[in-house]
């Protein structure tokens, strides 16, 4: 993958994620973690190679079908990317609204999820009035509200203290136990060592280490129809 | 008024207050041009129907022809015309009336008998079944080689050409005004997209279809177009009423008596709706095009 006519930021990256797996994505700043996540949440298409998401080749998938695929992927952005002019409730409700869900259903699900994330008393608060941790939870609630098959989080603990970071990881683990495939990009060696999960390690755009990936259940075949995500060379 | 819920804070943009007024100005100009064009059409219609009901026969005097013989020729032609099918009436215009018509050019002290002036016959046509003009011309020249039929066709054609040209100019100005409105909406929409790029991206990445995002911009453009259109048509109506009021107080012999009809007002009243729809469609196309550049 490359941006415009610039150098390739990702190359020789081949891996498969099994449904229900949990991976850390590690690497130094500039190693390509965010670029890989962007490919996975369909912000970019690969300039070469094969990327399949839910059995669809995203390089050739018609553009009009991409929104439906995106709705199956929950994303926690590094800077949260909450809409500051909307309340916490409306931020969390957004994925359901764009999907055309009825307002009565939205009300029920968002109320439940905000209560579960401990933000039941802050539904009407706008993000700028919330603490970093509360904003983080709103962002996570937004990524989960549509019950995604794949959850991607880009440095979700980057803006919170260690204690809150650990609590968030327990939350992700719980979601994973409920069947959601989780990939978390992080710098934190503390979290990686504490939560013994398979690691995808990137260096200079190359996937050089995928410790315990197979333990997550992957077969290495990017065309395996059971997998939510596969990336490899086009056949 | 029910306020639509929007995901984009477009209503807080600085351009939101300005755009309706600019669209209003454009609608105002379009309204005046359109009203002018409709009035011209109406005027031409009035002139055409007024004139096409009559023709004039000129009877040219022969060299050194006595007035008595010329009068006999005129009387003979009047009798022939009165017997002709499709003619409602024919009347020789008295020399005194011709003198009044010529007075601005010849003065009042000229002895008309001494001048070889053509005599005129005013012919009223049966508008239900008028005679063919060519046959009438032939019949008259057979009866008297010095009789010429003037059906005012040349004058009417020239008038129609002039009005047509003015209508074309008015139409061109309305087109320019429309294009300017489209340009304003494109500019405002692109500014809005640039100002809220982050929000647009988030909506896009959480699975919003292009139409969902475009709807937010097009709804705003529709409202702005409608507000601007109402402002423009209101000022336009006041201006037209003012001009009509002023015209009523000027010597009516100088200005033609013409006014906008009910259906003209209906056309003008539809301008705000047209402006709103143009603004909405332009905003939608602009957003959809921009979004196509995203994955």
Image (spheres, coloured by chain):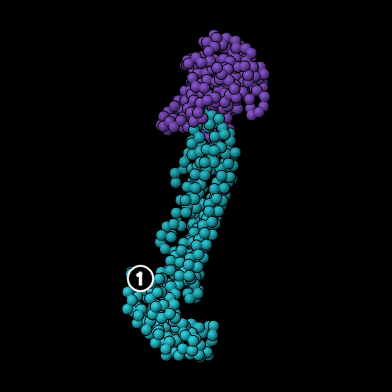
Chain colours: A purple, B cyan
> How many marks can you see?
1
Tell me, yes or no, if residue B247 can be seen here. yes
Residue nearest the observer in this picture, B16 or A229: A229
Q: Position of residue A124 (x, y in %)?
A: 50, 33
Tell me, yes or no, if residue A76 can be seen here. no
Task: Give me the residue at 56% from left, 37% from top.
Answer: B290
Q: Quadrant of residue A35?
A: top right
Q: Position of residue A221 (x, y in %)?
A: 53, 13
What secondary structure is marked by label 1?
Answer: loop
Task: Give me the residue at 58% from left, 20% from top.
Answer: A49
Q: Position of residue B207 (x, y in %)?
A: 50, 29
Residue nearest the observer in this picture, B31 or A82: B31
Q: In the displayed structure, would residue B260 be above or below residue B293? A: below
Task: Give me the residue at 48% from left, 76% from top.
Answer: B253
Residue nearest the observer in this picture, B5 or B126: B126
Task: Give me the residue at 59% from left, 42% from top.
Answer: B191
Q: Position of residue B236 (x, y in %)?
A: 50, 59
Quadrant of the drawing holding the N terminus of chain A: top right
Quadrant of the drawing holding the C terminus of chain A: top right
Q: In the displayed structure, would residue A214 be above or below residue A102? A: above
Q: For mark 1, does the 10 Å Cα neighbourhood hold few (<14), some (14 to 19), or many (20 or more) residues?
A: some
Residue nearest the observer in this picture, B63 or B193: B63
Q: In the displayed structure, would residue B169 be above or below residue A152? A: below
Q: Which residue is mark 1?
A: B130
Letter of the chain that mark 1 sits on in the rendering: B
């Amino acid at each position: 993958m490359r941006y415009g006519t610039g150098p390739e930021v990702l190359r020789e990256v081949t891996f498969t994620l099994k449904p229900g797996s949990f991976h850390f994505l590690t690497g130094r700043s500039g190693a390509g973690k965010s670029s890989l996540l962007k490919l996975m949440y369909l912000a970019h298409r690969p300039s070469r190679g094969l990327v399949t998401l839910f059995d669809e080749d995203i390089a050739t998938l018609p553009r009009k079908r991409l929104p439906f695929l995106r709705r199956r992927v929950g994303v926690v952005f590094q800077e949260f990317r909450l809409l500051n002019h909307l309340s916490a409730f409306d931020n969390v409700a957004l994925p359901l609204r764009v999907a055309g869900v009825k307002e009565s259903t939205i009300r029920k699900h968002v109320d439940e999820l905000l209560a579960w994330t401990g933000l039941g008393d802050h539904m009407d608060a706008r993000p700028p009035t919330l603490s970093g941790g509360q904003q983080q939870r709103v962002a996570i609630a937004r990524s989960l509200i549509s019950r995604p098959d794949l959850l991607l989080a880009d440095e979700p603990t980057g803006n919170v203290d260690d204690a809150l970071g650990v609590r968030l990881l327990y939350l992700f683990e719980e979601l994973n136990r409920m069947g959601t495939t989780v990939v978390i990009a992080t710098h934190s060696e503390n979290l990686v060592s504490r939560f013994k999960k398979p690691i995808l390690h990137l260096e200079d755009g190359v996937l050089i280490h995928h410790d315990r990936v197979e333990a997550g259940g992957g077969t290495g075949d990017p065309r395996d129809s059971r997998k939510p995500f596969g990336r490899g060379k086009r056949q | 008024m029910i306020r639509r819920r929007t995901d984009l804070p477009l209503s807080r943009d600085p351009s939101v207050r300005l755009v309706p007024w600019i669209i209003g100005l454009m609608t105002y100009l379009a309204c005046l041009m359109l009203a002018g064009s409709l009035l011209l059409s109406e005027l031409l219609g009035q002139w055409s129907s007024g004139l096409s009901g009559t023709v004039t026969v000129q009877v040219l005097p022969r060299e050194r022809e006595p007035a008595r013989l010329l009068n006999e020729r005129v009387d003979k032609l009047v009798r022939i015309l009165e017997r002709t099918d499709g003619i409602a009436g024919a009347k020789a215009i008295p020399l005194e009336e011709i003198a009044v018509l010529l007075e601005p050019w010849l003065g009042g002290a000229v002895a008309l008998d001494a001048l070889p002036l053509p005599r005129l016959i005013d012919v009223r046509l049966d508008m239900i079944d008028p005679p063919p003009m060519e046959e009438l011309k032939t019949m008259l020249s057979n009866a008297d080689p010095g009789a010429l039929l003037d059906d005012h066709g040349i004058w009417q054609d020239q008038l129609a050409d002039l009005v047509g040209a003015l209508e074309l100019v008015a139409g061109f100005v309305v087109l320019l005004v429309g294009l300017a409105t489209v340009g304003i909406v494109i500019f405002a929409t692109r500014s809005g997209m640039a100002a809220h790029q982050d929000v647009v991206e988030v909506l896009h990445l959480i699975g919003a279809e292009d139409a969902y995002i475009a709807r937010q911009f097009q709804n705003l453009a529709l409202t702005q177009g409608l507000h601007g259109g109402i402002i423009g048509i209101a000022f336009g109506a006041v201006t037209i009423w003012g001009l009509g009021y002023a015209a009523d107080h000027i010597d009516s012999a100088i200005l033609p008596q013409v006014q906008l009809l009910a259906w003209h007002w209906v056309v003008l009243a539809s301008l705000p709706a047209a402006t709103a729809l143009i603004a909405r469609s332009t905003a939608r196309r602009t957003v959809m095009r921009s979004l196509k550049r995203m994955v």
